[in-house]
Image (tube, helix red, strand yellow):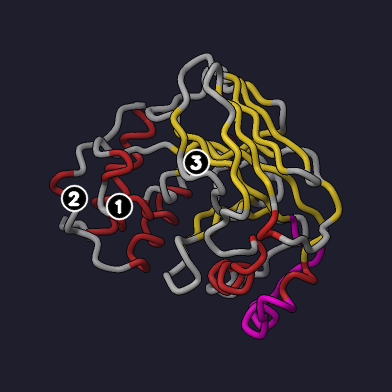
């Protein structure tokens, strides 16, 4: 029986996860031609991943407000509370992103999502936390894989560590300072470096994506909103800490 490009790419990702070996993406790079195909791959792969019954967690983001945003529902098994230890969790890459995660205080229906603006959407947020996303890949090309293959692979998601939740209060994000410590590397400090200027700006687009098939996004759902530090290299055994002044911190032992 002939398989579709979506099924072929999904099968490669599923096999890579099961074998804990990245798949050869050379012959697959041209198979996907749209973001919708990549999201269809995400959905097929998600059917093979165990759930825990916790509230959903997502990632969303993009390089600028004028560029398309990308989104991915995150596997439950890789969403942890700080301080976290990766233990036997398997990574091919160990790239670090320091982010702000937001938690919804209300259910959001498709009709509500369709009417949102960045200003009104921030009223849906009840809490925020510092998060550390560990970037990983199921492709041999890693972060150099084709853009749609990376999107199909949960936009290169590995795991997510969430710090303590604090009440959501709009901030002067242009002056927000973030510091990252990785093992014995020098501390890195970033100010006002979120690509969208405000982590909550992406909420309308993300919620319209998350409700596109008619489902309601439940209160308590978490979305992490993109890096403030680019992607920083870490190594096995490193302790990683991300701090956002006035918000909190998160840490993970690799």
Q: Quadrant of residue 33?
A: bottom left
Question: Which residue of the protein is positioned furthest toward the right in this rendering?
Answer: 167
Q: Quadrant of residue 107?
A: bottom right
Residue placed under numbered mark 1 in the picture: 149
Cα distance between the residues tagged 3 and 1: 18 Å
Q: Residue at x 86, y 54 (%)?
A: 167
Across and down, in percent, residue 91 comes to: 43, 27
- Sequence order check: which comes first, mark 3 or mark 1? 3
Label 3 crowd bin: few (<14), some (14–19), many (20+), radius 10 Å:
few
Question: Is 231 on the left or on the right of 243, as rendered?
Answer: left
Q: Nearer the viewer, residue 208 or 96?
A: 96
- Is there CB contact under 8 Å for labels 2 and 1? yes
Instruction: Specify start and end residues of the magenta stretch as a single range.
Output: 103-120
Is label 3 in a helix, a strand or a loop? Answer: loop
Across and down, in percent, residue 93 comes to: 39, 30
Residue placed under numbered mark 2 in the picture: 28
Q: Quadrant of the C terminus?
A: top right
Cα distance between the residues tagged 2 and 3: 22 Å
Q: Nearer the viewer, residue 144 or 3?
A: 144
Q: Quadrant of the N terminus?
A: bottom left
- Sequence order check: which comes first, mark 2 or mark 1? 2
- Sequence order check: which comes first, mark 2 or mark 3? 2
Q: Residue at x 44, y 49 (%)?
A: 154
| Whether residue 34 is situated above or below residue 149 in the rendered picture | below
| Whether residue 251 is situated above or below residue 209 in the rendered picture | above
Residue placed under numbered mark 3 in the picture: 49
Labels 2, 3: front one: 2
């Amino acid at each position: 029986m002939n398989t579709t490009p979506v099924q072929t790419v999904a099968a490669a990702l599923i096999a890579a996860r099961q074998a804990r070996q990245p798949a050869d993406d050379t012959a697959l790079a041209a198979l996907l031609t749209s973001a919708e195909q990549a999201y269809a791959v995400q959905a097929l792969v998600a059917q093979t991943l165990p759930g825990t019954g916790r509230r959903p967690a997502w990632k969303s983001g993009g390089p600028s407000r004028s560029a398309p945003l990308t989104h991915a529902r995150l596997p439950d098994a890789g969403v942890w509370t700080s301080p976290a230890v990766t233990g036997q969790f398997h990574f091919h890459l160990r790239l670090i992103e320091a982010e702000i995660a937001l938690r919804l205080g209300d259910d959001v229906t498709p009709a509500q999502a369709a009417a949102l603006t960045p200003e009104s959407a921030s009223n849906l947020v009840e809490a925020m936390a510092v998060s550390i996303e560990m970037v990983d890949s199921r492709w041999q090309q890693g972060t150099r894989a084709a853009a749609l293959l990376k999107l199909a692979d949960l936009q290169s998601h590995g795991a997510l560590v969430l710090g303590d939740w604090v009440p959501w209060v709009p901030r002067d994000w242009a002056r927000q300072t973030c510091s990252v410590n990785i093992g014995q590397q020098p501390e890195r400090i970033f100010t006002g470096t979120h690509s969208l200027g405000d982590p909550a700006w992406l909420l309308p687009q993300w919620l319209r994506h998350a409700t596109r098939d008619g489902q309601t996004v439940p209160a308590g759902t978490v979305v992490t909103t993109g890096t403030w530090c680019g992607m920083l290299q870490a190594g096995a055994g490193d302790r990683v800490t991300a701090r956002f002044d006035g918000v909190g911190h998160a840490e993970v032992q690799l």
